Image: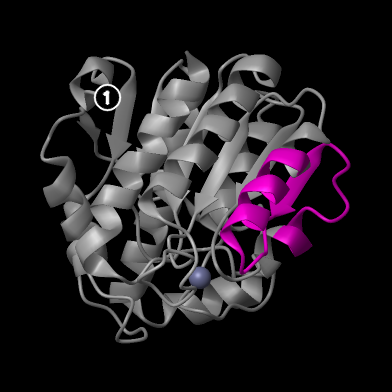
Amino acid sequence: MSSELYSDKIRIVYHPDYQNHYTTASCETPTRVTSIMKYLDNRFPVIQPDECADEDILLCHSDGLLTIEKQLPDRYHVARLAVGGAITAAQLALDGFTSFAVIRPPGHHANPDHNWGFCFFNNMAIAIMKLLTAGAIHSATILDIDLHFGDGTDTIFKSHDNIHVLNIQSSNPDDFLKSTESSLNSIGHSDIIAISAGFDQYEKDWGANLTIDDYRKIGVFAGEFAQNRCNGKIFTILEGGYYIPDLGNNVESLLMGIMQGLS
Ligand SMILES: [Zn+2]
């Protein structure tokens, strides 16, 4: 399948400052995003996001957490840009594009008042909450395919009946795919579907589980769900994924699957 066919429909969200070094675990390195961008090689238009505002962060996080994160300005800047990237990807989806935010730091372990797992603010939760509070959407489905349970996103939306947070957890590839499909099938209409795309379930990554083609299959399920139940509204943001040589390949595979599912 030629990815160039989709250059008018796909938008990549990226900011050069995602390459900045900041205080975090050594495996959460800038080469995660630079390797993806190099692989995609400008085949799709790239949109540069702005930093989010404090008010955006406070949609999902406490004043206390915000104050703590402000104490490390270099990291705070990139963390705000990551939230801004997720917000931009969400808006692009509403505008009719299939968007992928190649962002770091990841966000799904960021809870209202504490964070861990290389996450500082919950990029996905803030993007969805911003659309909700603006009245742009009333419901959403969040599909989290990272190796690790997205506890932050799950906690933030626990009391929101119209926001379905699906954490797919299986160490068997067939079960993982079946679980993705059946979880999506259990949901009716949503105004948008958003994928928290961690690639650490990849067979050469920590999870030692999914193949590159499995990411395409997951993309097909999500794309079909978007087409049939979300009026085609779908965006994806990067969460984990630490096997650098194949990160770009996996991103492309997921994206091409989404486009296949949408068509
Ligand atoms: Zn992870």
**69 on left or right of 158:** left
Residue 151 position (above or below residue 72) = above
User: Start and end of the magenta stretch?
Assistant: 154-182
Question: Which residue is identified by label 1?
Answer: 1
Residue 46 position, x and y percent, is 21, 34
Residue 197 position, x and y percent, is 48, 52
- Name, please, the residue furthest toward the front: 174
**31 on left or right of 142:** left
Residue 92 position (above or below residue 51) = above
Helix or strand or loop: what does disc 1 sit on? loop
Three-letter amino acid code at the position of disc 1: Met
Instruction: Check if residue 96 falls in the magenta segment.
Output: no
Q: Residue at x 58, y 33 (%)?
A: 222
Which of the 4 quarters of the picture holds residue 139?
top right
Q: Residues within 10 Å of mark 1 (few under 14, many from 20)?
A: few
- Specify the quadrant that holds the N terminus: top left
Residue 168 position, x and y percent, is 67, 57
Which of the 4 quarters of the picture holds residue 187?
top right
Q: Residue at x 29, y 58 (%)?
A: 247
